[in-house]
Amino acid sequence: MKQKIKLVHFIHGLIMGGAETLVKEYALGIDKNKFDLTILCLNRYNSPYEKMLEKQGIKIIYISDFLTFYERKNIFFRFVNKLQRYYFVRKILKKLQPDILHIHLLLNQMVLFSALPKTTRIFYTQHHDFISYQKEYQQDIRALKKLIGKYPTKLIALNKDMREQMNRFFGISNTVILNNGTDLERFKHIKTKVQIRKELGIAQDAFVIGHIGRFDSIKNQTFLIDIVAALLKKKPNAFLIMIGSGPDRAKIEAKIKEMKMKERTLLLSNRTDIPDLFAAMDCFVFPSIKEGLPVSVIEAQFATVPCVISNRVCKDVKISDLVTFKSLQEPISAWIEAILAKPPAEFSVNYKDWDISIIIKKLEKLYEQ
């Protein structure tokens, strides 16, 4: 019997963000007869993704479980935690001896410190805007350069522009594109708008604006609240659903209170019924300051929800006529006009290139090469 390929996916944790969702989909869909998979995480969050994967028998190792002072937050203990993280990542990777280590997000320095055997094959997926990554995370990108020099390395981009930027910066020509796919089966049997609104306690005649994303300043969610606050003056039945979690949640809650929108807003987190939640929406709004390729916008189109999104989002995300790009420099009135515009009477959505089962097969071939 052919020996399985030992594969490790390395990520900060399994909160319900874009990169984390992709790792979750990879872990569920990858051929377990070919690959012996382990997910290595820095932090344990007790999230639905963790429970889902553990229930399916996916091996997950959390570095935070080994830290002496994980819950202690002052400067000294944070420093000790950082040192311990480097030590335990190195120790665990040496024990796992992966044939392939697939890195997600800003973890290249830890991998470099781990001094893996030179036969280890490195995969790295760039999940966000590469130009910003160059400017803001110089230590991590220097570590990635060194990894490319020491190990057989395959870089993965989310779109053509990102691939060209990465090839040019690293002086290579073999960066590949893999779309951020999703499980299309989840969109075939969803609840009706009446059902899901009843469950959420939203009036059936409400005009519902939806948003999915980590609560973080880069997602520009305070601007979204400003848009809906202005929309409420024109359309009093407007209602906002925001789905996510993250460091800016308290800031978002304070903004909602300041704009007197508490009765017209619903904040949800740790939801695994995203297709059903799309059914409750009349328009999906995504005003990010910068973005790679957000799977939530792809999924909104699968759910046939009109989308109004920032022109800072990668243009490849437009896979149907349901998407309208708006500049962040335009007035709020222009955003409201786009939100209230009627969607096209007829449209088609490009499903094939975003089917996660097809994308996983492409990834498996890259691994096997």
Image (tube, helix red, strand yellow):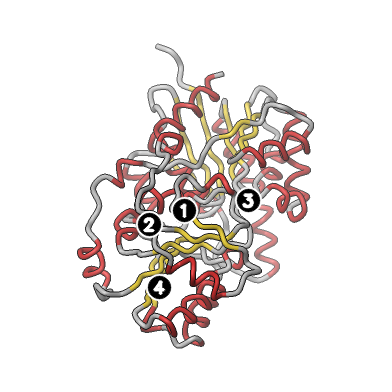
Q: Amino acid at mark 3?
A: Arg
- Graded by Cα atoms within 10 Å as few (under 14), some (14 to 19) or many (20 or more), the crowding at tag 1 reads many
- Graded by Cα atoms within 10 Å as few (under 14), some (14 to 19) or many (20 or more), the crowding at tag 3 reads some
Tag shown at residue 305 = 2
> What's the distance in space between the residues labelled 2 and 4, CA to CA?
15 Å
> What's the distance in space between the residues labelled 3 and 2, CA to CA?
42 Å
Residue at left offset 77%, top offset 37% = 145
Residue at left offset 67%, top offset 59% = 80
Element class at badge 2: loop
Tag shown at residue 228 = none
Mark sitting earlier along the chain (3/4): 3
> What's the distance in space between the residues labelled 3 and 4, CA to CA?
39 Å
Q: Amino acid at mark 1?
A: Val
Residue at left offset 71%, top offset 45% = 109
Residue 157, horizontal then vertical, whole percent: 61, 38
Q: Nearer the viewer, mark 3 or mark 4?
A: 4
Residue at left offset 34%, top offset 72% = 207
Q: Is residue 347 above or below residue 100?
A: below
Left or right side of 303 for 369: right
Find disc 1 in the rendering and name its residue: 297
The reply to whether the C-beta atoms of the residues labelled 2 and 1 are less than 8 Å apart is no
Find disc 4 in the rendering and name its residue: 240
Whether residue 250 is visible here, answered yes or no, is no
Residue 216, horizontal then vertical, whole percent: 57, 66
